[in-house]
Image (cartoon, rainbow, N blue to C red):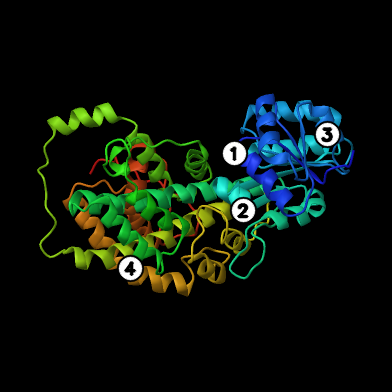
Amino acid sequence: MKKSDIGVVGLGVMGSSLARNAESKGWSVSVYNRSSDKVDSFKQSFEEGRNFQSFKQLKRFVDSLERPRKIILMIKAGKPVDALIEKITPLLNKGDILIDGGNSYYKDTTRRVKKLKEKDIEYLGMGVSGGEIGALKGPSMMPGGSKKAWEESYEILESMAATDFSGKPCVSYLGNEGSGHLVKMVHNGIEYGIMQMLSEVYQILRKGYKLEPKVIGEMFRRFNEGKLESYLVEICEPILKEVDEKTGKPLVDIILDKAGQKGTGRWTARDALEYGVETSMISQAVHARVASAFKKKRLLLSKTYNFGEKNVSPETSLENMIPKLENCLYSAWIVVMDQGLRMIKDIAEEFEWEIDLKEVARVWQGGCIIRAKLLDDVYKNIKNDGLLESKWAEKNVEAGYDDWRDVLVEGLNLSVPTYVLSSGLASLINDVSAQTSANMIQAMRDYFGAHKYERTDSKEGEKFHNDWYEEN
């Protein structure tokens, strides 16, 4: 039996699509799934006339691979990955390679890299973004972990990847240990932020301007023809123009307003707090999804609280609002990118991982969910200390600031919750303020807890306590 170039474990949507992707690029592929029915389904649908081998026994699957074996794991993150590693490791030889292509937590990946290194097994934690179509036709891939594993696997991975704006593969070795999965986690956090701010703009137009979804979809189509060109803006048009077959109404009006999540956005928000990184737009996007789940509570309170039905401000016509929304979204997009990239930088420094932020921006240019035209400018202008420090960001964020503020004023007037757009503007104002309110916070902390404070006229790090209770 001819040995396969690469193996894929897990024949769900993503695993099946990645296996087909690799085979379409000329590689021979072995596939395995714990559930035999998925193996049968894959074999029936795709194996005939193709360079596939399908297996129901793990040992036969492993034995079918050319050494050093290269095996992509496309299974549920967490305990299932550890369980499979325990099961497959005894079947491997020194130098064989495992590539975790799921949404694993980056600290778990670091642990696995170290554990498997002791057994001379090379391990890559590789974030994969692009959904089913991306996995099939070319995803963005973000590997980190064993450098040797990358050197042995990059030809296959590069052939499978999407391409950036200059035609290069959207895959790159990002660093050791869990660095690849850190980048993928933050990618998903940024994705949360962008999705929420697009939804907030939709709600302003739907609730405030009483526009039909198909009309709003047309506006998003025009947005996508300009500086907001991106995958997430692009899909808004077909979503908003879709009609429900059962009711004949716009499908978006029939979909229940309770947003789900799988954990990566929540991890991003949690770890930002743990490492002291400001990612308020991502965190508020997570909070918005959590809040959406309380549908019964919202229905009850909507009947008891009456803030009055507000109309669009007389001076804010739809004609005037459309360019404001576009400029607002563009400025907010830059800020949420800055927050995410800064988080990658700060956590990477914590673990002494040398992640190149320019390379991250390049890898995100194609295949992934947050791919967007502005990522070319991000790639060209990102600095070691952040994105907002660049002249490009300064020019574009300043140009959109007034419109961003006007959009939020209108959102408040219409009682539309703007979790991400509001927190983003507050974050921006804080970032460009030489003086904030934190001195008042420090005074209160010292008053009730003697926590001490620094002074503007003393050495950095020198702490003081005031005797607030001293009698006059």
How far from the left and from the top, in percent, is residue 353? Answer: 68, 52
Between the C-alphas of marks 4 and 1, the distance is: 40 Å
Between the C-alphas of marks 2 and 1, the distance is: 13 Å
Mark 2 and mark 1 lie on one chain; the one further toward the N terminus is 1
Which residue is labeled 1 in the image? 13
Q: Establish if 328 lies above or below 145.
A: below
Amino acid on which the number 4 mark rests in the picture: Gly
Amino acid on which the number 1 mark rests in the picture: Val
The quarter in which the N terminus is drawn is top right
How far from the left and from the top, in percent, is residue 282? Answer: 43, 47
Mark 2 vs 3: CB contact within 8 A = no
Q: Residue 103: name its quadrant.
A: top right
Q: Nearer the viewer, residue 131 or 274?
A: 131
Mark 1 and mark 3 lie on one chain; the one further toward the N terminus is 1
Q: Nearer the viewer, mark 1 or mark 3?
A: 1
Mark 2 and mark 4 lie on one chain; the one further toward the N terminus is 2
Which residue is labeled 3 in the image? 62
Q: Nearer the viewer, mark 4 or mark 1?
A: 1
Between the C-alphas of marks 1 and 3, the distance is: 22 Å
Which residue is labeled 2 in the image? 137
Q: Establish if 440 lies above or below 389.
A: above
Give the structural element (helix, strand or loop) at label 2: helix
- The numbered dot on residue 41 is none
Q: Nearer the viewer, mark 3 or mark 4?
A: 3
Mark 2 and mark 3 lie on one chain; the one further toward the N terminus is 3
